[in-house]
Amino acid sequence: MKLISAIIKPFKLDEVRTALNVVGVQGVTVTDVRGFGRQKGHTELYRGAEYVVDFLPKVKLEAAVPDALLDEAIAAIEKAAATGKIGDGKIFVIDLEQAIRIRTGETGGEAL
């Protein structure tokens, strides 16, 4: 099992969720986050004053997937989240040792 953690642009969330459903990912956790990458934020103009936006709004999407779905899930996120512009985001894959469904006590892949 793997835990996919993807940081994407907020307006791409629905497209990514739909793409993950199509490949068979059943559950996703979404968190509103802020951060910056290589671009280190950007400057904006508001009422004639220029100011720096250090932390850009992003969405963090997490999904636990069986190893068999990993490559399809990553490809789905990449395709759905891409705009071709700077700041499209990142995908991280982490080994997941154990998963437990609290309601039933199921463990491992059955809990997903």
Image (cartoon, rainbow, N blue to C red):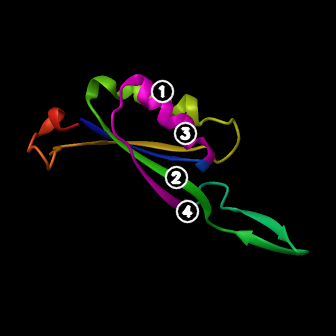
Residue closest to the far right: 48
Q: CA distance from mark 1 to mark 3?
A: 16 Å
Q: Which residue is mark 3?
A: 14
Does residue 96 appear to the left or right of 74 in the view shown?
left
Q: Which secondary structure lies at badge 3? A: helix
Residue matched to label 1: 75
Q: Are marks 2 and 1 in contact (CB under 8 Å)?
A: no
Around disc 3, counting alpha carbons within 10 Å, would you say few (fewer than 14), some (14 to 19), or many (20 or more)?
few
Q: Sequence order check: which comes first, mark 1 or mark 3?
A: 3
Residue ID at (48%, 36%): 17
Q: CA distance from mark 1 to mark 4?
A: 24 Å
Image quadrant in which you'd find residue 88: top right
Q: Which amino acid lies under the numbered mark 3 shown in the image of this protein?
A: Asp
Q: Between marks 2 and 3, how big is the CA–CA gap?
A: 11 Å
For the residue labelled by badge 1, is the local secondary structure a helix, a strand or a loop?
Answer: helix
Looking at numbered disc 1 in the image, what kind of residue is underneath it? Ala
Q: Which residue is mark 2?
A: 59
Q: Which residues are magenta?
A: 11-33
Residue at the location (17% across, 43% down)? 97
User: Residue 112 at x, y = what percent?
Assistant: 23, 36
Local crowd size for mark 4, using a 10 Å CA cut-off: few (<14), some (14–19), many (≥20): few
Label of residue 13 in the image: none
Q: In this figure, which residue is indicated by the disc labeled 4?
A: 34
Q: Earlier in the sequence, mark 1 or mark 4?
A: 4
Q: Quick one: label 2, few (<14), some, or many (20+) residues within 10 Å?
A: many
Disc 2 secondary structure class: strand
**Magenta stretch containing residue 80, yes or no?**
no
Query: Which numbered disc flags the more N-terminal residue, 2 or 1?
Result: 2
